[in-house]
Amino acid sequence: MTPLLSRTNAEAHLYMDLHPCSCGATGFPRQSTVVTLDDGDLASRYTGACVGCGQEREFVFRLPPLVAPAGGGFRYGGDEPSQLLDPGEWLLVSDAYAGQVPAQPSAGEAGQRARAALSRAVAALDEVGKFIPTGADAVPPDAFTSDRGRQLHQREPGRFRRDRLAAIRDAYAGLFSRLG
């Protein structure tokens, strides 16, 4: 099997966090190395023992040919849609990070945690938008490749409309900037 492209380390770690061991645990202390694939491309290889059952886990992700320049805030990837997560999974990630933000975030360390969570929620929403074809109003049904992504889309298809995603993103970004 050809390893899927991981556009950033953050995307690779998120993928591993969302794919538990057969025992159900998601955590494992990760050792990483860069390896050369049979076709000559480079990949990141993550290994470690599951914290739940001790079973060895391994993930291998193809590295992008070009690394996106840093700056401009937290990002999971470049302009192309993810090969690791589908739009439903990205929306669930955004929901989870937004759910970590208190209704009235304070300053200090709690404010910093809220800003970090909001930046990741916004970045995950941006990932959902990358699945909307140019000129389309919503993510097409065939973009959903995971069970949890398809289930979310079936339950709430309106959440994948361009205008709704933009409104939620703007609300999160506004709160992020108010937190300074």
Image (spheres, rainbow, N blue to C red):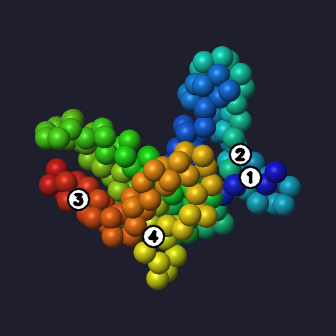
> Which numbered disc flags the more N-terminal residue, 3 or 2?
2
- The residue nearer to you, when weighing 57 against 138, is 138
- Marks 3 and 2 in Cβ contact (< 8 Å): no
Type of amino acid at the residue the image marks with label 1: Pro
Q: Which residue in the structure is indicated by mark 2?
A: 60
Residue 171 badge? 3
- Marks 1 and 2 in Cβ contact (< 8 Å): yes
Q: Which residue in the structure is indicated by mark 1?
A: 3
- The residue nearer to you, when weighing 141 against 86, is 141
Estimate how packed mark 4 is, as few (under 14), some (14 to 19) or many (20 or more) residues with alpha carbons within 10 Å. many
- The residue nearer to you, when weighing 119 against 159, is 159
Type of amino acid at the residue the image marks with label 2: Val
Q: CA distance from mark 3 to mark 2?
A: 36 Å
Estimate how packed mark 3 is, as few (under 14), some (14 to 19) or many (20 or more) residues with alpha carbons within 10 Å. few
x, y percent for residue 176: 22, 54
Q: Is residue 145 above or below residue 111?
A: below
> Which numbered disc flags the more N-terminal residue, 1 or 2?
1
> Which numbered disc flags the more N-terminal residue, 4 or 1?
1
Q: How many marks?
A: 4
x, y percent for residue 28: 59, 27
Q: Nearer the viewer, mark 4 or mark 3?
A: 4
Q: CA distance from mark 1 to mark 2?
A: 6 Å
